[in-house]
Image: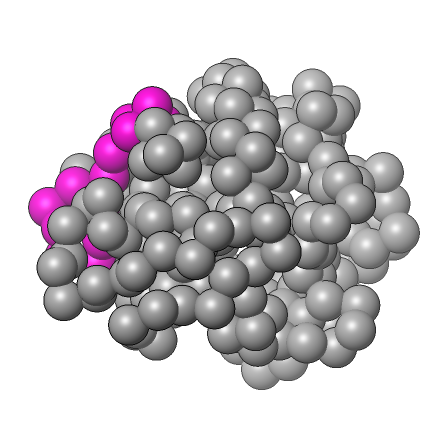
Amino acid sequence: MIVESRAGVEKLPFNPENYSLEEILKPQQSALIVVDMQNDFLDPNGFFAKRLKTPIDQMQSTVPYIQGLIEAARKARVPVIFTKGYEDVKFRKGPDIRRAVKWDERDGDGSVNSQSGTWGSEFYKGIEPQEGDVVVEKHKWSAFDGKDREGRTFKQILDQLGVKTLVMTGVVAETCVETSVRDAYSQGYFVVVPRNSVGSNNLEQLQARIAYWEKGFIGDVVSEEEIEEAWAK
């Protein structure tokens, strides 16, 4: 079948039944997803480093890799979609409120990660959206629970752009990234994870996720170079 082109992107045949990595990564059907690259996760003065007293160096190490993928995506006219998560207790319902009770979280006292309207919830330096990028704001872990400022759901955005493959990057591996990966797979999207572009403050959790994803149950784990080369074609 022929997929309708985006502005500035040449129409190319897409043969999903081929199922090769080259086919899956064709630019006209791909999107780069950048999950929750925000100050509270990545900055030395953010929630994870200051409040949780947890190491953030591995999460920071993803920055140059994600920057490279963003640059490659923009050159290839591959949509770049940023998610921005807010953990405000006021936005939560049901089990998420139970989590706030267990963790003794309250809005306004510094106990909430990435609270809306705070510096901690803003994008980390060097990983900011530009004109033409999409920003999806969410109050739960999965990107599929978010909406953009026009009220479009994440899935509506993907469908309007003709996206079939999600190249998934960002933090944190065992929460927002993994939840988004699993939701993408369950809803019929191809998932590709760039090996060095997913971060966590817990290396054991990160390694466990990468090892599972590498087995191919829900997608592919490849190098950033492979993705950039596929898009450059």
Q: Nearer the viewer, residue 64 or 52?
A: 64
Residue 186 x/y as whole percent: 30, 73
Q: Nearer the viewer, residue 54 or 176?
A: 176
What is the quadrant of residue 154 in the picture?
Answer: bottom right
Residue 47 in sight here: no
Q: Look at the image and name its color scheme.
A: one colour
Residue 147 in sight here: yes
Q: Nearer the viewer, residue 177 or 100?
A: 177
Residue 98 x/y as whole percent: 57, 72
Residue 14 x/y as whole percent: 28, 61
**Going 73% across and 41% down the picture, which residue do you hit?**
129
Question: Which quarter of the figure is the N terminus placed in?
Answer: bottom left
- Count of number-bearing discs: 0
Q: Nearer the viewer, residue 106 or 145?
A: 145
**Going 70% across and 55% down the picture, which residue do you hit?**
135
Q: Is residue 223 magenta?
A: yes
Q: Is residue 39 left or right of residue 186?
A: right
What is the quadrant of residue 180 in the picture?
Answer: bottom left
Residue 48 x/y as whole percent: 62, 33
Q: Is residue 185 left or right of residue 9?
A: left
Magenta-tinted stretch: 214-227
Q: Is residue 196 magenta?
A: no
**Going 30% across and 60% down the picture, which residue do you hit?**
13
Q: Is residue 194 left or right of residue 211?
A: right
Question: Which quarter of the figure is the C terminus placed in?
Answer: top left
Q: Looking at this rendering, what residue extends furthest in the bottom direction? A: 94
**Going 42% across and 48% down the picture, which residue do you hit?**
27
Q: Is residue 103 left or right of residue 182?
A: right
